[in-house]
Amino acid sequence: MFGPIAHSIRRRSLPYLRPPRSLRLVPLAAGAALALAAALSPACVAPKASAAATIGLRAWSYWCSMLLGASPLLAVGGLVAAVASRVPRRWNGALLLATSICLPGCDCTMNAYCGELARLSPGVGAFAVIWGACCNPIALVATALVLGPRMALDRALCGFIAAGFTALAWGRWAALPAMHLSGSRHSFWERCASAMATSLGSFSMAAVVASIIISVGDRHLANASGLVAAAFGALLSPCSSSDSILARVLFAHPKSQLSFMLAAQCLDVRQVLMLRRHFGLARTFFAVGSSATACALGYALV
């Protein structure tokens, strides 16, 4: 009974069933950890083991909390990618543009269907990526409720500048070749699972870094400069619906709060890697430059 099913699974190319190449580093990391443990004496390790275990447990708790909060967005992104790959081309652009603008288009969701945005013209795709990540309706409403309507307006203005400059820069290129687009050789649910796996992998790596930074980082950031706030936001890469809460908790000055939110959505590690993976290095460079310009203008004008 299960023979034909198993045979079909073996014959198909299902990317979400293949282990990632990064797993090849696990034996190397385990060997290095064992060698380090053998080189250190128990008397040297014991005093610091309790503090290290506390930090590790705190980081694990943060990571699990981030994954629990991002799971619905990861699922939505996978469904959007699967639907977009089946929609006729004449409706595909409108669907993707509306999805990017109306849904929470931060990295949790957009990592799953960003490849489908290559079906749009370069300028429209660029605007959808940047605006959806920074200024989707949920992000603007959350910013207005937490930091006030003026901060939400400043965020929308800076996001429009970043998205507009990126669209103008990307407009110099032609549309991406057809071979770059995600194909439809897989079924609906296979495409959905593949997109969710890609998004989950990107999220997990960023969440590990963010959880470690939160666990061991300096908590006295109230008077941090805009540059420090931007760097902190780029490394943490929080969801667009929660970055305003973190900005209010971590930073006291509005300039630093705005820099943190803009960098967390337009200059963060996940966003840069996503753009590099789907659109190439040159377009990523112009997107980062446009977002950095908008961030600097926002810091100067607030």
Image (cartoon, rainbow, N blue to C red):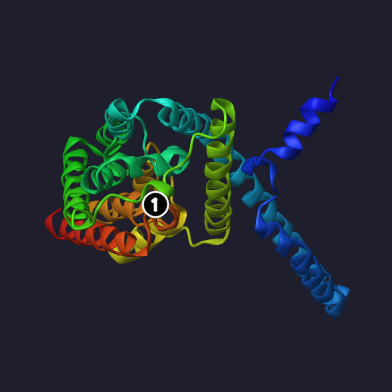
Residue 225 visible to the viewer: no
Q: Nearer the viewer, residue 211 or 76?
A: 76
Q: Nearer the viewer, residue 80 or 67?
A: 80
Give left or right: position of 251 versus 73: left
Q: Quadrant of the N terminus?
A: top right
Q: Nearer the viewer, residue 14 or 25?
A: 14
- Horizontal and vertical percent position of residue 119: 33, 40
Residue sitting at the far top: 1
Q: Nearer the viewer, residue 302 or 283?
A: 283
Assign a secondary structure to mark 1: helix
Tell how many labels. 1
- Asked if 192 appears above or below 170 in the picture, the reply is above
Residue sitting at the far left: 301
Residue at horizontal 55 percent and vertical 44 percent from the top = 198
Q: Which picture quadrant has residue 301?
A: bottom left
Residue at horizontal 58 percent and vertical 27 percent from the top = 189
Q: How many other residues sit within 10 Å of disc 1, few (<14), some (14-19) or many (≥20)?
A: some
Q: Which picture quadrant has residue 33?
A: bottom right
- Horizontal and vertical percent position of residue 51: 70, 61
Residue at horizontal 80 percent and vertical 26 percent from the top = 4
- Horizontal and vertical percent position of residue 138: 32, 31
Q: Which picture quadrant has residue 285?
A: bottom left
- Asked if 154 appears above or below 186 in the picture, the reply is below
The residue identified by callout 1 is 250
Residue at horizontal 58 percent and vertical 41 percent from the top = 197
Give left or right: position of 14 versus 134: right
Residue 210 visible to the viewer: yes
- Horizontal and vertical percent position of residue 209: 55, 57
Q: Amino acid at mark 1?
A: Leu
